[in-house]
Structure formats: structure tokens, C-alpha cells
Image (spheres, helix red, strand yellow):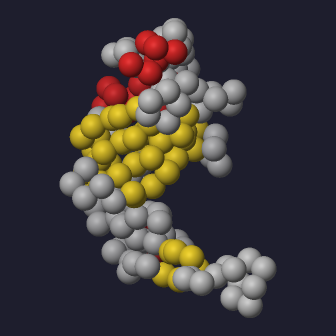
Amino acid sequence: MAKPVSFPAPTTPAEVELGTLLQPKFGPDGLIPCITVDHATNEVLMFAYMSAESLARTIETRKATYWSRSRNKLWVKGEESGNLLRVVDLYVDCDQDVLLLKVENAGPGACHNGYRSCFYRRLVPGADPDGALAPTLEFAAERTFDPAAVYGKK
């Protein structure tokens, strides 16, 4: 069984917002949102959650490690595909309740569907939930790898 990991509890608002001690604010579920971007381009690659343990492992190993809510376990991004995300920088927002990872991707993409980014679709311009043009999506990127070849499925 893994040793419990803890970070300092938030102190004063001034220390949290302007201090130098990492005091992440995990939600009631024990998770903190994490945005992951390419360190060179600032392209948003993915969004996931971290637990205290996955944050500690990310800091220790410099490999992006998240908490998989669907699998209910730690998840090292790329452990199956080989598309590991090496952490170049870790940032926190002003009140330390969101993390931002700047990473270098070891593979052609970060998305399990074969795209460089998980954000490969966008809302069609002019879409209106109450109008004639229903909110539909269009593809904004091409696949960078075949997920069937990487994962043996999809």
C-alpha cells in the first residue's frame, strides 16, 4: 500500500496567493484540476485531475501522473502508449486550486483517440442552441497516430 502523501494545509490567503510554499487546494473529492500544455507552443494538450499522491509522483519523477476518475487509480500518461509527458515546469494559479503542467511529449500525441491534443474539435461558428444551427462540432485537427496500432483497439 502506498504511503499517504500530504502537502501543507493552506495557511493565510496572503501566503497562499503571494507566498512561495506549495499549498495546493484539493477539492472535497481529494482532487485538483490540472491543465497540461506543450512547453514550446503553449498548445493545450489535455485536462485531468491530480490527487496528492499523483502530484507528488509527478514532482518526483517529472512524468505527468494523474488520478483517473474512471479507473479509480493513478495513471502515468503514456504508460501504455509510450507517449509520456515529461514535465518541464509546474505552475499553480493565484489561489493554488488549479495546476498547469508544461510538458514535452515523448510521442506524436497526447490524446488516446490519436490526436496531438485532446482538444481536436471545436464548435461550428454560428451555432445557436435555440436557433436553426444546432450546436455541432467540427474537427480542427488531424490524427497524429493510429490508436488501434498503439492500444490494440479503438
Outermost residue on the bottom side: it is 132
**Taking 121 as reference, is 57 left or right?**
left
Residue at coordinates 25% horizontally, 50% vertically from top-left?
A: 39
Residue 68 in picture, x, y percent from top left: 57, 44
Left or right? Give the position of 129 relative to 3. right
Q: Can I make out residue 50 in this image?
A: no
Residue sitting at x 44%, y 30%: 94
Image coords of residue 87 (percent x, y): 29, 40
Residue 119 or residue 130, whichever sits in front: 130
Q: Give the quadrant of the C terminus.
A: bottom right
Whole-percent x and y of residue 72? Answer: 64, 40
Q: Residue at x 48, y 42 (%)?
A: 34
Instruction: Relative to 91, say whether 16 is above or below.
Output: above
Residue at left offset 35%, top offset 74%: 145
Question: Where residue 40 sits in the image (x, y, percent)?
Answer: 21, 54
Which quarter of the figure is the N terminus placed in? top right
Residue 60 is drawn in which quadrant?
Answer: top left
Q: Residue 110: in sight, yes or no?
A: yes
Is residue 60 placed above or below 16 in the rendered structure? below
- The residue nearer to you, when weighing 147 against 105, is 105
- Toward which corner of the image does residue 137 lie, by quadrant? bottom right
In the displayed structure, does residue 138 sit left or right of residue 78? right
Q: Residue placed farthest to the right in the image? A: 130
Query: Which residue is most to the left?
Result: 40
Pick whichever, 97 or 17, lies toward us: 17
Total tally of numbered discs in the picture:
0
